[in-house]
């Protein structure tokens, strides 16, 4: 049996794109435990770090719910950074022959959700601007998240009678909304629903206290209460 490679806390921090102080805090809270040397130095198994990075939805959820520090490789501070990473994902997906018929649609769905985050929170971010954006080609999953205003606050600008996150989420995925530019809100999510309904793509979308599930190849909306309400949006695309 090959002995697992131990790496220093500084190397682990470099791989994750976080500070050493963040790793110390994560160790103390149990989020990412270290292996202490006899001298008390924190080390990590390289495989441990790789597994941590592979939990994309967990990392996004922690950031959206708690504002925890993100690995820099998953953070897009502005729409230009997002478009650059989206193009890179497109290039990688295009190199997988079995995904040839599907990858442009996956990229389009991710693009709509990510662009919504930037367009609808422009100049109005409550605390941290930008979005979480990551993907795993092998697991066929894309994860996006933001700590923005959320769908309800966004849509109330053009549909003031909305009262709940569930109502706003249903409207966002079903109704064409009008409004003077740039106040037209959420219309890209109708496109997302159409793509999912017609293709083997699934979507979990959470905002506020609402959780929406779109099943691959189905036009049905399954909206229920989210077990952990939060401000902003969180999406998991599977294909």
Image (tube, helix red, strand yellow):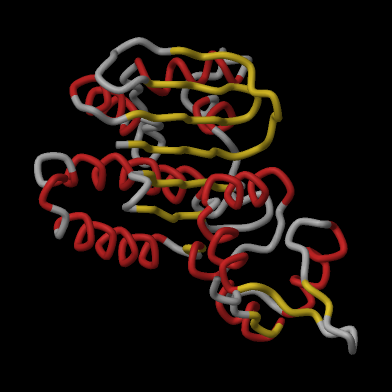
Left or right? Give the position of 69 relative to 191: right
Q: Nearer the viewer, residue 129 or 5?
A: 5
Name the residue furthest bottom. Answer: 39
Residue 12 coordinates in the image, percent (x, y): 63, 78
Residue 126 coordinates in the image, percent (x, y): 67, 49
Kindly indicate the quadrant of the structure image that contains residue 21.
bottom right
Location of the N terminus (image quadrant): bottom right
Residue at image position (37%, 32%) is: 184
Left or right? Give the position of 41 relative to 132: right
Residue at image position (88%, 85%) is: 38
Q: Nearer the viewer, residue 166 or 70?
A: 70
Residue at image position (62%, 44%) is: 61
Q: Compared to 6, does 158 lie above or below?
A: above
Left or right? Give the position of 203 relative to 98: right
Location of the C terminus (image quadrant): top left
Q: Compared to 97, does 7 lie above or below?
A: below
Kindly indicate the quadrant of the structure image that contains residue 89.
bottom left
Q: Nearer the viewer, residue 106 or 123?
A: 106
Left or right? Give the position of 213 relative to 63: left
Residue at image position (59%, 79%) is: 5
């Amino acid at each position: 049996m090959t002995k697992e490679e131990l790496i220093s806390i500084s190397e682990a921090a470099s791989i994750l794109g976080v500070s050493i102080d963040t790793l110390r805090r994560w160790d103390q809270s149990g989020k990412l435990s270290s292996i202490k040397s006899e001298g008390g130095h924190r080390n990590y198994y390289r495989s441990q770090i790789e597994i941590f990075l592979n939990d994309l939805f967990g990392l996004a959820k922690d950031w959206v719910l708690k504002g925890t520090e993100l690995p820099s490789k998953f953070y897009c501070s502005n729409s230009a950074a997002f478009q650059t990473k989206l193009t890179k994902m497109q290039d990688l997906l295009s190199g997988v022959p079995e995904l040839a018929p599907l990858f442009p649609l996956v990229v389009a769905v991710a693009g709509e959700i990510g662009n919504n985050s930037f367009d609808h929170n422009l100049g109005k971010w409550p605390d941290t601007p930008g979005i979480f954006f990551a993907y795993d080609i092998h697991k066929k999953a894309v994860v996006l998240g933001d700590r923005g205003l959320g769908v309800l606050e966004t849509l109330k600008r053009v549909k003031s009678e909305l009262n709940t996150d569930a109502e706003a989420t249903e409207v966002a995925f079903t109704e064409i909304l009008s409004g003077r530019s740039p106040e037209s809100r959420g219309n890209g999510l109708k496109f997302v629903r159409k793509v999912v309904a017609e293709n083997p793509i699934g979507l979990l979308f959470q905002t506020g206290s609402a959780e929406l599930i779109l099943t691959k190849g189905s036009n049905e909306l399954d909206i229920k209460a989210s077990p952990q309400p939060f401000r902003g949006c969180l999406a998991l695309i599977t294909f």
